[in-house]
Image (tube, grey):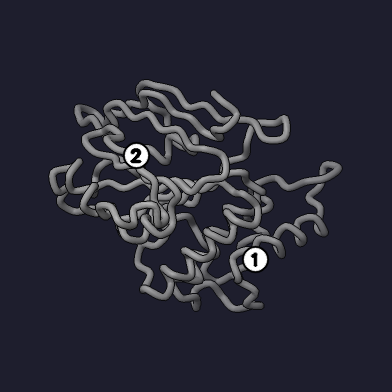
Amino acid sequence: MGSEYILSAGHIQKKYGGNTVLRDVSIHVKRGEIYGLAGKNGSGKTTLFRILAGLARPCGGSVSIGRTGGRESRISAAMDSPSLFLNMSAAQNMKEQAYLLGIRGGGRIERIERNERIERALDAVGLNCGDRAVKNFSLGMAQRLKLGLALLGSPDMLILDEPSNGLDPGGIAELRELLAGLNRSSGMTILISSHILSELEQTATRVGILHNGEIVKELPARGALKGRASLEKIYMEHTGGGNGIG
């Protein structure tokens, strides 16, 4: 895999019983880009993301992860429904995640290091909200906390499955700015799926269309389509309409 790619997957296949979800998926994510994945409901986006994140095994094909600074690149994922402790604050949720990640020094979890990481992650997602319990968060705040939990491991790449699900237009805009800021400030690579094609067009630098278990089209986004066909029109052309985009 060339050094320009942080993640590369070739000919991924996945079946559940007699149902083929991923037929032959190849995807190559460039270092520092925001790659958006579009596809109808049931097209296999979540299954593909779970395989790329190492949470599921493919029936065929391979996944390669590039190196960053002489080590294998770190990849974190925020899937659709990660567990949150609703009676705890955002910082307390972060502390629990730090224990799970094994953020340690000298055989013991370092309180100072843990607090520094938590503060950086909370700052990155704009969640300095004191002792407020997560059960009192808005959906947008909960989504930012899930993203903050993914950032605790200092990843080089984030995999985000439908992070704008359920958000109102204001929350979607806030999420878009947050992801753009992470990408711009640290060069973080982001792989994201969304059922809102216009949002992918604004957020992503490149978009892949998943249909019938394959990537049927890749194209530039984030303003590159101005004066040309919209992403929605191109999607419809390559999927025959794709009832239930999601």
Left or right of 110 in this view: 120: left
User: Could you tell me which residue is drawn at 70 percent across and 31 percent down?
Assistant: 71
Q: Nearer the viewer, residue 38 or 89?
A: 38
Q: Position of residue 44 (x, y in %)?
A: 30, 40
Left or right of 116 in this view: 215: left
Q: Nearer the viewer, residue 132 or 212?
A: 212
Q: Earlier in the sequence, mark 2 or mark 1?
A: 1
The crowding category of the residue bearing disc 2, from other C-alpha atoms within 10 Å (few below 14, some 14 to 19, many at least 20), is some
Give amino acid for label 1.
Leu
Residue for badge 1: 122
Number of numbered discs = 2
Please tell me whether residue 106 is drawn above or below residue 84 in the rendered image: above
Q: Are marks 2 and 1 in contact (CB under 8 Å)?
A: no
Left or right of 153 in this view: 49: left
User: Could you tell me which residue is drawn at 48 percent across and 30 percent down?
Assistant: 8
In the image, farthest residue toward the right: 106
Give amino acid for label 2.
Glu
Mark 2 and mark 1: span between their CA atoms?
A: 34 Å
Q: Position of residue 135 (x, y in %)?
A: 49, 74
Q: Position of residue 35 (x, y in %)?
A: 44, 45
**Residue 20 appears anywhere in the view:** yes
Local secondary structure at mark 2: strand
Q: Position of residue 151 (x, y in %)?
A: 61, 53
Q: Quadrant of residue 47?
A: top left
Residue for badge 2: 218
Q: Nearer the viewer, residue 59 or 2?
A: 2
* Foreground label between 2 and 1: 2
